[in-house]
Amino acid sequence: MQLEENYPVFSAQRRDFGRDFVFGVATAAYQIEGGQTDGRGSSIWDTFSATPGNTKNGETGHDACDHYRRWPQDLDLIKDGGFDAYRFSFSWPRSLPQGQGAPNQKGLDFYERLLDGMLERGIRPFATLYHWDLPSALQDRGGWMNRDVASWFAEYATLIARRFGDRLASIATLNEPWCTAYVGHFMGRHAPGYRDVRAMTRAMHHVLFAHGTAIDALRAEGAKNLGIVTVLKHSQPFSSSAEDAAANDVEDAMFNRWYMDGLFKSSYPEVLVKLLEPHLPERWQDDLPVVARPLDWIGINYYTRQTIQFDLSVPLWRSKKVPGPLPKNDLGWEIYPEGLTHVLQRVTREYTKLPIYVTENGITETDDTRRVDFYDRHLQALLAAQRAGSDVRGYFAWSLLDNYEWAEGYTPRFGIVHTDYATQTRTPKGSYLAFQRMLARAADV
Ligand code: IFM
């Protein structure tokens, strides 16, 4: 693709980020693959989205972006954009239709082709094992509420490491465990659609226990460069009152600290243990050393901040989220680039000196000039965190393509490439071109 003078540009240059800094794009299997064929099993998202009322316009990921067939074109887009890496997820039900037991050879062959396609194009594969598509057969046995999920997940991790480990640049166990536990088991807005504090609490512990168990399984297979992807928000009280500070403490623990304390301090925040202990599985403390297995890197997804106010009428938490004053994206998420600097510095200051990758960052927006501005400001915020001492080694834009945004269906458009769902035509947006222009200057590095 030719570069032209009127392309949108970012204010940062590639060399500002450091010599080995990795630029990539991210997607997830259920959001783009489609391809419900060739022996793929059912997942909790297939059944959740098929249930009336659960998703906008009843939309499902049945076809999504048809990436199952169109992957060569999508990999070409990544290469032509100048990206170094592709963060994608394996589909557990495509690999193991029943979640355990007999693998689906045709499904594994698809990932074989995809990985070879990346390597042929010089794209480094950053894999995620679980991006929310639990096999339905495992949900039938309690899914994330059942402690056995740890051994099911380890079996799946072993399969992937044996077959593909030699070709993966890195492996993340889970994407955003908060979302699985809280949005899927407490808000009921994601699969499996529970609204129950006990279901949530069990899932909160089991996601992390399964993560650590999978890390052991991956290491036993010799897999390298292992991590996990957590989503973090900058969390702040609405006012300087003691009540708002206490409310923010609970919400920050719920969103950020439960996962980061578990992973890096081998403990859970006291304020939440007090509230949730009756629902935690017996002898949960015994699992904490597994939860905190050493990692090689940490992935952070960042989108927005939260502002928290005390509210006596809310059971349990006594808090609510209130809208911040800044402009919002199409889903009402406040745009706060400085928050990326804050969360990256917080990781370095409070948790770990491990390399950090920003594994997702992006905006749903139909006006692409706002998307260019969003990326520009967040890239500057990342540089500010680097200058302040955070060891940030990579950045992945969410997302390569407009895709299936879970309960919100196909209305939100997070892609740097536009997807016409009727024809499956891909059209690069200005934001893609801005990345391309920045990344094409490899000679600057
Ligand atoms: O689309 C999601 C993705 O699956 C996980 N992180 C947030 C994105 C935007 O909501």
Image (spheres, grey):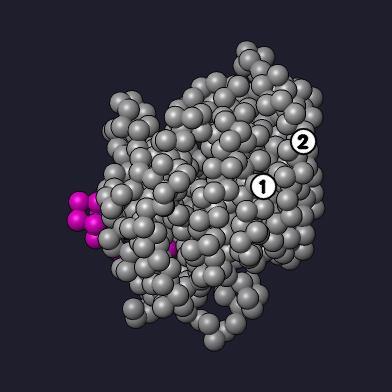
**What is the three-letter code of the residue carrying label 1?**
Gly
Q: Which residue is mark 1?
A: 212
- At 79% from the left and 29% from the top, the residue drawn is 270
35 relative to 273 in the view: left or right? left
Residues shaded magenta: 419-431
Neighbor class of circle 1 (other Cα within 10 Å; few <14, some 14-19, many 20+) is many
Percent of width and height locating residue 277: 72, 23
Asked whether 427 falls inside the magenta stretch, the response is yes
Neighbor class of circle 2 (other Cα within 10 Å; few <14, some 14-19, many 20+) is few
- At 58% from the left and 51% from the top, the residue drawn is 173
When the figure is inspected, residue 283 is found, relative to residue 260, above or below; the finding is: above
Point out the image quarter for the C terminus. bottom right
Contact (Cβ within 8 Å) of mark 1 with mark 2: no
Question: As rendered, which of 282 and 417 lies closer to the eye?
Answer: 282
Residue 441 visible somewhere in the drawing: yes
Q: Which residue is mark 2?
A: 286
Q: Choose the circle earlier in sequence order: 1 or 2.
A: 1
381 relative to 332 in the view: left or right? right
Question: As rendered, which of 3 and 142 lies closer to the eye?
Answer: 142
Percent of width and height locating residue 24: 50, 66
Residue 323 visible somewhere in the drawing: no
The image quadrant of residue 348 is bottom right
- At 38% from the left and 45% from the top, the residue drawn is 97
Give the distance between the C-alpha atoms of the residues marked 1 and 2, in whole angstroms: 13 Å
When the figure is inspected, residue 345 is found, relative to residue 23, above or below; the finding is: above
